[in-house]
Every structure is written in structure tokens, then in C-alpha cells.
Image (spheres, helix red, strand yellow):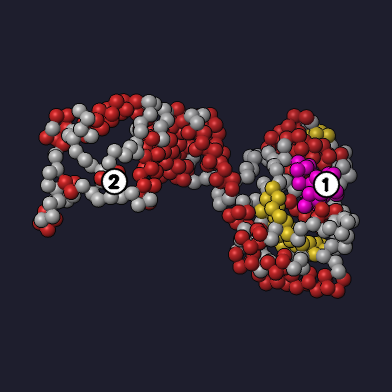
Amino acid sequence: MDLFDDAGMEPEGIPSDAKAPLAVRMRPRGVDDVLGQDHLLTPGSPLRRLIDAHSGDSGPSSVILWGPPGTGKTTLSYLIARTGSRKFVELSAVSAGVKDLRAVISEARRHLTTSGAETVLFIDEVHRFSKTQQDALLPAVENRWVILVAATTENPSFSIVTPLLSRSIMLTLHGLGPEHVGQLLERAVADERGLAGRYSLLPESKDMIVRLAGSDARRSLTVLEAAAATTAARQDTAITVEDVSEAIDVAAMSYDRDGDAHYDVISAFIKSIRGSNVDAAMHYLARMLEAGEDPRFVARRLMISAAEDVGMADPSALQTATAAAQSVALVGMPEARIILAEAVVHLATAPKSNAAYNAINAAIADVKAGKIGTIPNHLRDGSVWASRQTGAGEGYRYAHDYPGHIVTQQYLPDELAGTRYYEPTENGYEAQITPRLAKYRSIVDGEQ
């Protein structure tokens, strides 16, 4: 738990320790310095009112900031805390327990009563709090004993309890664009709090950091600081591409196997295969594997995709996906990447059909809706004596005894007679099924 009063803080609410990391030193001093979040900071918006606290309107009592890492969630909490005589308390959901929460709330309530000063309680990674811990916040938010600013990289609808959500304003932060990250790097190079003009950032080096950082401001400044240290070590002042490369060997990717990024990437992967874009599918496969995703998980998803999206347009796709899953389990990484890549190429370039997928969904929907009916008597099991006494199996026509091994006969219950679930497409192998199925249905239904 970190409690910031006046000590160790600048008037703007930013830590003043010169030894702090560059990303901390360069936190915006005011709203105008915040990059990429203009949609949240327009005059009169809930967040702006909370930061400005003017005209007697102090804004909402609880705000949930949802967004990717490095987009300014902690910074915004500092800007809220700097208003008036507010105190600032920071808790990490990774280490804080219910006891810590209650202690902070009790102190905030006492402080509010004795001095009238509000306490901003910033909770990072709030999605890691248990339901009990989140419930412990409810009285404090309800009575405004604290101004809660909760930050999360996970979808609050799934990770935050409903009572807390209903008492909070949920604000979505956008990932920073390349222009914002570039502007931030230029500011850090020149600003006295940053590199103070002691170094120059070559254009190609800046572009490389922007590319490596993605939408993460913190990561961009961390790479810049490390690259500057490399430049200083070789007694130079121009930060080169080589300095950046030495500072960061592999771009760290935002990919939490239990979080939104995991589901976003696998979703993009499957949708790219479905859309027959083999290049995009290969890109997302690489992202998952480089982030340490379990290749067996990827293989399982490929089997599902083969059945759902390729289907009977190319029945061999499921065979390929199944063989890939078995091979991946036997071989492991890094060679498994080749096996998965081969399966991805097959699925992405195969003709597509979701007719079988639609068929089972429609059949299940009917069953759930009670459209079941009685099994025709001639299809029932007549092998048991008691069943035969009821006529089970009588009148059944053995298909192999008839020309073409197909015969006119009712198979569906009376209530569903004539129902069509499977409607083949004209894609790939399924195009061969369409005329054959039409013929079979015609004979079975007695139309021939």
C-alpha cells in the first residue's frame, strides 16, 4: 500500500523522485498533457468533472478505467488526486487483502470527518480482487468515504461484481496511436524530467520504438530509457537503431493467457481462417506462439474451426487438424509451429461451409423447444421380447435390400416429418453432396 501526501510529490500529484523510472517521471502534469484519451476529457465529461471538481460538482464517486496497459490509467488517478486537498492511496489488487482495504477505508472516513478532505483510492488490476474484496468496497463507494478509481485491463462486465459496477462510471481508454507514442518520445527526450536534451533520438530509432511499443506509453518510455543507457555506455549522444535493438531483444507482447488479449487474438485467428485470409491467420498464430500460448490449445481450436467453418466443403480439413493436434502433442515446440502452420494453410485456403454447424444448431434448438415427438414404431429396437410385444421394429425396411441401398421410409417423428436441417452449399466437396442428397430425400420421401 502506498499513501502519498505532500512528501515525495510534486504539486501536480506526480512522484518527484529523480531516480524514478522515466515512465514515472514523465507522467502528465495536467489534463492537456494526456495523450490519446480526448474522448474522456472533454469539458463537462464525468472524468473531467472529477479532475476539475469545479462549481461544487465533484463528479462521480467511483470510476472504473478499462483499457490496455500503458494508456494512462494510473496517470488519470494522480490527476484526480491533485484536486484540492485530496489524499491519494494506491493499492495493488495483487497484494492487498480485505484487511488492507478496511484499514484504508477507515482512515479515509476518519480523515473526511476531521478535515473534510477526500481520499482518492486507486486500485490497480482490480479484476484480480475476489468477490469478497470487491464487496468490501461497496459501503465506501455508496457513502463517498473514498473516491474510488479502479483500473483494469479486463472487461469489467466479466471481472467486476454487479453491485460495484452499478455504483460506478465505466470509462474505456483507447490504446495510443503511433502519433501519440511518437509525440511522447519526443517530449521525453527534451523535457527536464526526462532526458533533458542530453540525447538525440534518430528518426529510424524513434520509428522502431513506436513499432515495438505498440499502444503502450509505459513500454515506449522504458525502451527509450534502456536505449539511452546503451548510448551513454558507448559514450555517444545519438540513440541509434542498434541501441534500441540491444535494449530490447524481443518485443514484449501484451498477451495474458487468462485475459482479454488471449481471447481477442484467438478470435482474430479463427475469424481470419474463416475469412480465408491465410496471411492474417499466420500472423495471429505467430503472435500466440511467441507469447507462449500452449500449442495444444491452438491445435484444439483448429479442429473446431475445421468442423465449424470448413465442414463438408473439405472433409479432409478435419483430418489435417486432428493429425496436427496429435503431432503437436508428440513433438512440442518449437517444431510444432511448422505442423500448426501447415494446418492453418489447409484450413484457411480450403472451401468453406458451415452447413453441418447450422444443421446441428437447428436440430438442438428444436429439441430444446420440445419438438421431439415419438420415434416411429418401425425404427424402435425390436431385439428384446417385451419390445416386440408392442410391435417395435415391425415394418422396418432394410435399406441394403433395395436398389441403390435406399428406400422410401419415414425416419423423423410425425411432428417433424419433412423438416430439413442440413442444407449443403455449392462449395468444394459439398457441391457433390447437393444433387445426391436431393435424390436421396426424394426417394426417402416417396417422391420417386
Looking at the rendering, the stretch of residues picked out in magenta corresponds to 19-48
Residue closer to the observer: 412 or 327: 412
Find out whether residue 402 is within the magenta segment: no
- Residue 414 x/y as whole percent: 25, 45
Q: Count of labels shown?
A: 2
**Where residue 208 appears, x then y in whole percent?**
71, 33
Left or right of residue 109: residue 298 = left
Residue drawn at 23 percent across, 34 percent down = 445
Residue in the foreground of this view, choosing between 25 and 55 = 55
Extreme-front residue of the structure? 415
Query: Which amino acid, by three-letter code, is at mark 1?
Result: Pro
Residue that mark 2 sits on: 415
Residue 383 at x, y percent in the picture: 12, 52
Amino acid found under the numbered disc labelled 2: Glu
Residue depicted at x 65% and y 58%: 165
Q: Position of residue 110 (x, y in %)?
A: 80, 74
Q: Give the quadrant of the C terminus.
A: top left
List the residue tagged with mark 1: 43
Mark 2 or mark 1, whichever is nearer to me: 2
Q: Secondary structure at mark 1?
A: loop
Q: What residue lies at 66% left-to-right and 61% top-to-bottom?
A: 164
Q: Residues within 10 Å of mark 1 (few under 14, many from 20)?
A: few
Q: Secondary structure at mark 2?
A: helix
Indicate the quadrant containing the N terminus: top left, top right, bottom left or bottom right: bottom right
Asked whether the residues under the numbered discs 2 and 1 touch, taking CB atoms below 8 Å apart as contact, a structural biologist would say no
Q: Is residue 194 visible?
A: no
Please tell me in which quadrant of the rendered image residue 401 appears: top left
Q: Quadrant of residue 216?
A: top right
Q: Earlier in the sequence, mark 2 or mark 1?
A: 1
The Cα atoms of the two marked residues, 2 and 1, are separated by 63 Å
